[in-house]
Every structure is written in structure tokens, then in C-alpha cells.
Image: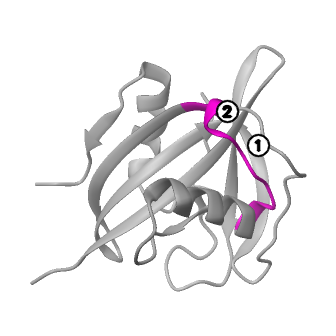
Amino acid sequence: MAQIHAAAGVFPMREKDGKIQILFQKRGNVEFGSGKWSVPGAGGVEVDESFMAAARREAMEELGIEFDDVNIVFQTILNGKSDFGAFIAMILFIDSWRGELRVCECDKCECIEWFDIDKLPEDLWLPQTTEFIMNFKNKIHYSEIGWL
């Protein structure tokens, strides 16, 4: 029987010069997606951990930030397939946080960088990323990406 992975991720976002920008991370020397752009502050949900608890933990571990529920601008749940197998993920977009955004896991992340929502990085690890960014723009809260 195939295993389904649970994951949570946090996209910090801001408005700059009248445009929405989203923070991405460039993955470092990791098993999946090395050198490609991905959701910053993302990872697996641990046993006995909720999606929200995992999102908060990953945001702190990877970006050095904390956020409150009132800072969640958008959330989407998606399920799909990737190079590590089937997954269900909760992706949050937040517009404010405590702490200074920084790379906390230098071995797993080369850098973080802001991108305009209409000009995303070309070398994305998960092809589903473009779709859930479009979900954010279009306020679509659930999608099934990658299922045949």
C-alpha cells in the first residue's frame, strides 16, 4: 500500500510598489529538488502534530519567524503527487510575522528571494506551485493537483 505524506508550508507575502510579492527559497543540497525554488518554511507533518503546528514549526526552523492566525491571508489544501510520492499539504500565505526572515538551515537552503506574483521563478521544484499560487490569486481554497 502506498504511503501518503502530509506536509505544511508557509509563504510570507508583501506588497511592494503596488504588486504582491511572495517569498521563495532555493533548495540546497537535499534529496529532492536541489537547486530549485520552493515554498519556504515547509516540511512534513510529524506524528501527533497538526498541520498548523507543523506550519508554525517549519516557519521558525527554516525562516526564523513566528506568526498568528490573524496573519493568515489565505490557505489552500492540495493533494497530489511528486518525486517523493503522494501528498496532502496545507499551504499558508501570511502578510506579517515576528522575527527577521533569514535562512536558518543553510545546508538545506541556498537563499531566499522575493518574486512578484505575476513573475514567479522559472525553476520550480514542484510544478504544482504555479497552480497553488494561482489559487491564491483567484481565492480557490482546495485543489487536487497531479491526480490522473
Are the two marked residues, 1 and 2, in contact with CB atoms closer than 8 angstroms?
A: no
Where does label 1 land, which residue?
Answer: 114
- Res. 112 image quadrant: bottom right
Q: Amino acid at mark 1?
A: Trp
Quarter of the picture containing the N terminus is bottom left
Magenta residues, start to end: 62-73
Q: Residues within 10 Å of mark 2 (few under 14, many from 20)?
A: some
Quarter of the picture containing the C terminus is bottom left
Check the image and report above or below for 143 versus 145: above
Residue 138 x/y as whole percent: 42, 20
Residue at 71% over, 39% down: 115
Left or right: 24 as drawn, with respect to 146:
right
Q: Amino acid at mark 2?
A: Asn
Residue 126 x/y as whole percent: 44, 59
Residue at 64% over, 30% down: 70
Where does label 2 land, which residue?
Answer: 71
Q: Secondary structure at mark 2?
A: helix
Q: Earlier in the sequence, mark 1 or mark 2?
A: 2
Q: Residues within 10 Å of mark 1 (few under 14, many from 20)?
A: some
- Res. 139 image quadrant: top left
Q: Nearer the viewer, residue 28 or 67?
A: 67
Check the image and report above or below for 69 versus 8: above
Check the image and report above or below for 106 versus 93: below
- How far apart in space, not on screen, are marks 1 and 2 (Cα)? 18 Å
Q: Secondary structure at mark 1?
A: strand
